[in-house]
Image (tube, rainbow, N blue to C red):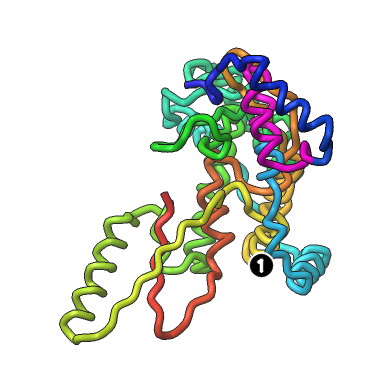
Amino acid sequence: MTLFPTYTYPLTKLKPMLKLLQTNPILIRTPQLLYLLMLILTTSDLEKAELFKLHLSEIFHPHLDIVDLENTNVVNTALDAPLQPSPSVKYFSPNEVKYLIHKYPRNKSPGFDLITFEVAKNLPKRAIVHLTHIYNSILRLSYFPLLWKFSNIIMIQKPNKPPDSTSSYRPISLLPLFAKILERLLLKRIAPIIAEKQILPDYQFGFRTSYSTIHQVHRLADAISYSLEKKLYCTYAFLDISQAFDRVWHQGLLYKLKSFIPTSYFLLFKSYLSDRSFKICYGIATSEIASINAGVPHGGILSPLLYNIFVSDQPTSPNTSVTRMIK
């Protein structure tokens, strides 16, 4: 389905608008009129890809309306503080790499390098050894390769949303396969650390092994039943966080990561989040490359866990029960 229906606008309808712009040029700065002009003028796949790029470039920034200067200074001061020495991390083995390649889903789309599961699955043993050496070098240097941070983004229309609005589409990042294998390797290493230090609260059920949203529904039903039996008031507030993954504040996330993960992993995550870039693939066209200044990529292996860590210290009160389900 195309982003904007391709209509033919008669000249008689365009002339009054053009005359209005000539007499009042300041009107072109209003978002409503500018968007209307885009609806009229945007017809080709390339123009739509560029429009999506502009839309996401505005989204991939932290929420500026909730910036707290005091907290920002605390975060920046902590990030600038010297790193604490930590034990050396365990390197990856060729067997680990081979196992995760063969466990990788077959139907996933490739990134910009077009390397698919079939290619990776048929790599010879020597290639696996060389790939493992690259992964261990990345771990040793705490440097995530720049090209592995570049994503092709396709836009998927959300259910029951109008197709002629850029906000009706969800961005899905297509990342290089070998970058996602590395993310799986890192996930296996840091998940036990997070569990041991109890970073995630017990009421966090989204994106966690052995947890299910069904369990949250049972908790909800149990709380309602208890209130009815005791003849108590039971009030619920359901919140939906808009653009949750796209607006994650990188400095805030790094501030939380620095407090509990070893230095080598922290520096690698710092490299992972910095200097990310993307381009939009729409139809047969692609947009120009743009930078990402906030958020974790949709489709990234580490993204759900990083988002859980980012929101793990949500304020609570003694008389309030919190449940969190992320879909």
Q: Is residue 140 visible in this depiction of the protein?
A: no
Which residue is depicted at the point 51% across and 49% down? 304
Q: Is residue 322 above or below residue 299?
A: below
Q: Is residue 122 above or below residue 129?
A: above
Which residue is depicted at the point 66% across and 45% down? 59
Q: Nearer the viewer, residue 97 or 187?
A: 187
Number of labelled discs?
1
Magenta-tinted stretch: 27-54
Which residue is depicted at the point 70% across and 23% down? 287
Q: Is residue 257 visible in this depiction of the protein?
A: yes
| Relative to 162, 227 lies left or right | left
Tag 1's secondary structure? loop
Residue on which the image places disc 1: 259
| Relative to 198, 222 lies left or right | left
Q: Position of residue 267 (x, y in %)?
A: 73, 52
Q: Quadrant of residue 84?
A: bottom right
Give the amino acid at mark 1: Ser
Q: Position of residue 117 (x, y in %)?
A: 49, 21
